[in-house]
Amino acid sequence: MAGVLSTPLIWLLDSPGAGQLAGATVQAAVGIAALVWALFQRPSSAGPTDRAVRTGEASRGGITGIRWPGGRGRGTATATAERTGEADGENSVSGIDYSN
């Protein structure tokens, strides 16, 4: 960013010709437009949309659905679990699990 801003200034300090002045003006305008555009960008606050439907049965630590340990990702997740099977046994998941 500093290079983009400093180049037009160096041109202007060295008695610019018409071409250099036009180049400095265009470069400065593009830099300002890029800065304004970046300021108006908003990261998506919505997280993933997870869905587990008819997942079957999980046993002996098996997973038949979605497991995101620690709830990875940013924002808020939207999760739907429908008609999931049975989970039998330690650490088995049938549906959606965001736990650690």
Image: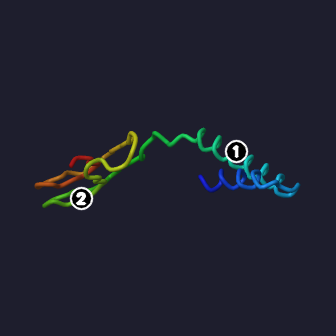
Nearest to the observer: residue 96 or residue 16: 16
The spot of residue 28 in percent (x, y) is: 73, 48
* Secondary element type, mark 2: loop
Q: Nearer the viewer, mark 2 or mark 1?
A: 1
Residue at the image point whose x is 22% and y is 47% from the top: 99
Residue bearing mark 1: 33
Mark 1, residues whose alpha carbon is within 10 Å: few (<14), some, or many (≥20)?
few
Q: Amino acid at mark 1?
A: Ala
* Secondary element type, mark 1: helix
Residue at the image point whose x is 26% and y is 49% from the top: 70
Residue at the image point whose x is 18% and y is 52% from the top: 87
Query: Which residue reaches farthest right?
Result: 18
Q: Amino acid at mark 2?
A: Ile
- The image quadrant that residue 64 belongs to is bottom left
What's the coloring here? rainbow
Is 52 situated left or right of 3 in this image?
left
The spot of residue 57 in percent (x, y) is: 22, 56
Residue at the image point whose x is 54% and y is 40% from the top: 42
Nearest to the observer: residue 37 or residue 100: 37
Q: Is residue 66 above or below residue 43?
A: below
Is 24 situated left or right of 86 in this image?
right
Mark 2, residues whose alpha carbon is within 10 Å: few (<14), some, or many (≥20)?
many
The spot of residue 49 in percent (x, y) is: 42, 46
The spot of residue 79 in percent (x, y) is: 36, 43
CB of mark 2 within 8 Å of CB of mark 1? no
- The image quadrant that residue 90 belongs to is bottom left
- The image quadrant that residue 88 belongs to is bottom left
Nearer-N-terminus badge (2/1)? 1
Is 16 situated left or right of 91 in this image?
right
Residue bearing mark 2: 63
